[in-house]
Amino acid sequence: MITSHLSGCYLQVGLIENIKPENKSFASLRETYQYLFRRNREFALLLWNGIPVRLSYVWDIPWMIEKIIILLDKLTDENELDTETHHHCYFQTKNLKFNWYLEWNSEAIEVDSFWEKIPGNYETALNSLGHIKMMKQEFLYEWKLLLEQLIRAFQDAGGRIYESEQADLFDMLLRINQSIEQRGRYYRTNDYNS
């Protein structure tokens, strides 16, 4: 049994190198971020019920970002606030393969996961703790700093996306970031005077 401090889904981002302005155009978000992070050897860590899953800024996040944006858009859609919703995400990258089956309402989110491929081969451990339940806002907060990194890297590089559907996804990313009020658990400032 895991403690309540570890249960859930938490994201610890990596350090992003200085992105140089290059004013390049890209067809897709995946192509954009794979190019912008090509020299980055950092990893983000997704803590799933206390078990760390490494996310490469070069080989994982660019392949995941489109599905993450679509998921977060559904979760922040004000028209869905009073209804229960379901969604399935299948993530496949060079390093990872896993499924998330999500169900949420205005207050909480539950995710059942199935992990097929993880560096280090500890899929069994992740699958034994494959279910999370947490407040929906807390789940959204966990993604904010990563979204901020993606936006900042794109803006610092002077990037442009010429495929209209992909440009719309970037606009959606901007909108989602603005709608999430604060950063996740490990990035909040604590007021010790209260």
Image: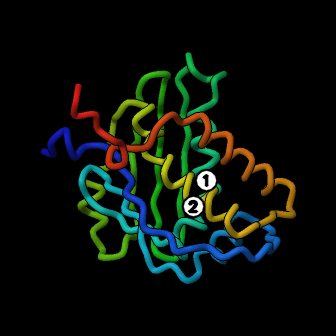
Q: Quadrant of residue 83?
A: top right
- Disc 2 versus disc 1: distance between alpha carbons? 6 Å
Q: Secondary structure at mark 1?
A: helix
> Considering depth in this image, is 36 or 67 the residue closer to the camera?
36
Task: Give how far across and how far down residue 182 sits, in percent.
Answer: 46, 38
Q: Quadrant of residue 71?
A: top right
Query: Along the horizontal axis of the image, is 193 left or right of 71?
Result: left
Q: Residue at x 46, y 49 (%)?
A: 100
Q: Are marks 2 and 1 in contact (CB under 8 Å)?
A: yes
Q: Is residue 128 above or below residue 18?
A: above
Task: Give how far across and how far down residue 38 sits, in percent.
Answer: 59, 81
Quadrant of the rendering where the C terminus is positioned: top left
Q: Is residue 136 above or below residue 160?
A: above
How are the residues colored? rainbow
Q: Is residue 44 above or below residue 79?
A: below
Q: Residue at x 47, y 66 (%)?
A: 97
Look at mark 1 in the image and give the residue it sits on. Answer: 67
Task: Give how far across and how far down residue 187 sits, in percent.
Answer: 37, 48
Look at mark 2 in the image and give the residue it sits on. Answer: 64
Residue furthest toward the bottom?
Answer: 39
Q: Secondary structure at mark 2?
A: helix
> Considering depth in this image, is 63 or 178 the residue closer to the camera?
178
Quadrant of the rendering where the N terminus is positioned: top left
Query: Along the horizontal axis of the image, is 121 left or right of 72?
Result: left
Three-letter amino acid code of the residue under disc 2: Met
Three-letter amino acid code of the residue under disc 1: Lys
